[in-house]
Image: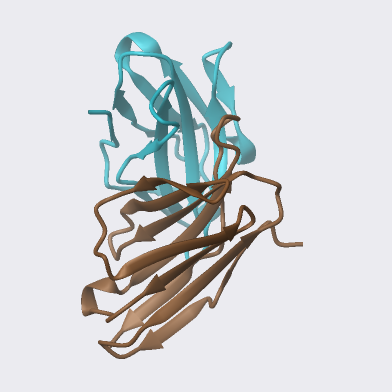
Chain colours: A brown, B cyan
Amino acid sequence: DTAVSQTPKYLVTQMGNDKSIKCEQNLGHDTMYWYKQDSKKFLKIMFSYNNKELIINETVPNRFSPKSPDKAHLNLHINSLELGDSAVYFCASSHLQGTGELFFGEGSRLTVL
Amino acid sequence: AQSVSQHNHHVILSEAASLELGCNYSYGGTVNLFWYVQYPGQHLQLLLKYFSGDPLVKGIKGFEAEFIKSKFSFNLRKPSVQWSDTAEYFCAVRGAGSNYQLIWGAGTKLIIKP
């Protein structure tokens, strides 16, 4: 069983389109995250939810909207895609007050043409 | 503000060479420290972590790291690298009372020549 699973793994789309990435974790964690990894491998936290509540909301364009229907799911919707949105998006989960260890999904590679 | 600095962006070594990747952080209080590895085309995985106790921490695949509080450092070491260690290595720090947020270094790309 995959602990943190993301779909889709690959997304190729045109500028201006809207797309979503879904994430699910079966580790019983209470906190989930979205990270963006650019072409230079730099990791940037975007959002974090703890028990469905937004706790980290970094400086990210409004076109990015996370949604957490329950603590095992965290989705990311992106409106009006731009070239600069091309990246690998990683979902992760953890126990907020535990060891702090993050468990990552396999990533969703988004390419905007 | 907290920050994490990884000194080398790229490291190239031959197989069997010894490895040390530097990581320094800025945070004055109690910290939790992590090294993650990302193999080509894969997701990040935990290599090792430090919370308390023995400052020399052993991780998977023969890696270890030493927490030196006075130097605000948590360097990663391996006595003899293998071609399969080619990967990106990330240091991360979480300060106690910091809203539990992990602060990440920029990563070090390690290439092992066979």
Q: Position of residue A57 (x, y in %)?
A: 34, 49
Instruction: Give how far across and how far down residue A82 sits, in percent.
Output: 23, 79
Q: Residue at x 30, y 91 (%)?
A: A14
Q: Is residue A82 above or below residue A41?
A: below
Judge whether A5 appears above or below B113 on screen.
below
Instruction: Looking at the picture, tell me which residue is in the foreground, B41 or B18.
Output: B41
Q: Residue at x 36, y 60 (%)?
A: A36
Quadrant of the frame with the C terminus of chain A: bottom left
The count of marks equals 0
Query: Which of A97/A85 is in front?
Result: A97
- Please tell me which residue lies in front, B13 or B39: B39
Quadrant of the image occupied by residue B64: top right
Quarter residue B58 falls in: top right
- Observer-nearest residue: A94 or A103? A94
Residue A108 x, y percent position in the rendering: 47, 71
Residue B106 location, quadrant: top left
Residue B68 point in image, percent of width and height: 40, 14
- Which quarter of the rendered picture does the N terminus of chain A lie within? bottom right
Q: Is residue B56 left or right of residue B12?
A: right
Residue visible at 28% across and 71% down? Answer: A63
